[in-house]
Image: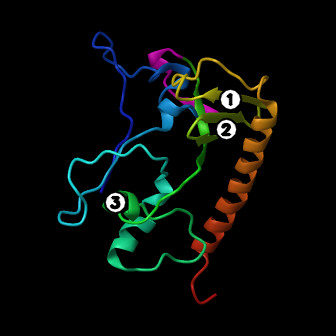
């Protein structure tokens, strides 16, 4: 199994790091800052060269090898096994992916001042929409992600009820994540 970083964008004429992808690229809460490939290899059990486009999350990586090994996932852990996707047997349905970042804004676009500053934000991505919520700024945005993959046309004002449903889902996810972290840090005999 291999998880890739989404890499650096560096023009050939700039020898130093630049703000990667601009304000909606790497280190941002936007899709180009989060979307990365996951590669699995298990000869004889996973077919070679198969590419899938389903919504998965980094939290799905933990239960997947456990499932292949026949080991139960500890209670309270987030994520789903990707085995049905990888083997083509069984069903895998994820309606949405939720994530967040505490550091996602450049201190400056100047390559000499490459650093990020606190700017907590969360996103919810489903098959059609991508919602972004900047907590401290009390700002949000909503994009039809397949039609607008660079997230340039914010439709939040036209789709406010949808945005509020997505924000409520993010809040639910935040509670589940806190509970999951608490469960993972509690010794099994406690």
For the residue pair 21 and 41, the one nearer the viewer reads as 41
What residue is shown at x 65% (from left), y 60% (from top)? 177
- Residue at label 2? 121
Q: Nearer the viewer, residue 140 or 15?
A: 140
- Is 123 placed left or right of 167 in the picture? left
Which residue is at 61% across, 34% downward? 130
Rounded to the nearest angstrom, the CA distance separating label 1 from label 3 is: 33 Å
User: Looking at the picture, how far across and down is residue 150, in whole percent?
Assistant: 52, 22
Q: Secondary structure at mark 3?
A: loop
Front label number (2 vs 1):
1
Relative to 31, residue 77 above or below: below
Q: Residue furthest left?
A: 43
Residue 27 in view (yes/no): no
Residue on which the image places disc 3: 88
Q: Residues within 10 Å of mark 1 (few under 14, many from 20)?
A: many
Q: Is residue 158 above or below residue 190?
A: above
- Over which residues does the magenta segment extend? 109-121
């Amino acid at each position: 199994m291999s998880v890739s970083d989404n890499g650096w964008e560096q023009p050939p004429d700039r020898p130093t790091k630049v703000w990667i992808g601009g304000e909606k690229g790497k280190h941002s809460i936007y899709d180009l800052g989060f979307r990365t490939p996951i590669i699995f290899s298990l000869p004889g059990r996973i077919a070679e060269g198969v590419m899938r486009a389903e919504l998965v999350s980094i939290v799905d990586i933990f239960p997947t090898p456990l499932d292949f090994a026949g080991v139960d996932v500890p209670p309270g852990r987030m994520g789903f096994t990707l085995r049905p996707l990888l083997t083509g047997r069984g069903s895998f349905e994820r309606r949405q992916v939720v994530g967040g970042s505490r550091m996602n804004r450049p201190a400056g676009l100047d390559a000499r001042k490459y650093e990020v500053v606190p700017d907590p934000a969360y996103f919810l991505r489903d098959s059609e929409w991508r919602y972004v919520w900047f907590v401290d700024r009390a700002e949000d945005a909503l994009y039809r992600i397949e039609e607008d993959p660079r997230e340039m046309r914010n439709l939040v004002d036209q789709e406010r009820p949808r945005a509020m449903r997505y924000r409520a889902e993010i809040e639910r996810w935040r509670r589940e994540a806190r509970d999951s972290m608490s469960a993972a840090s509690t010794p099994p005999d406690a």
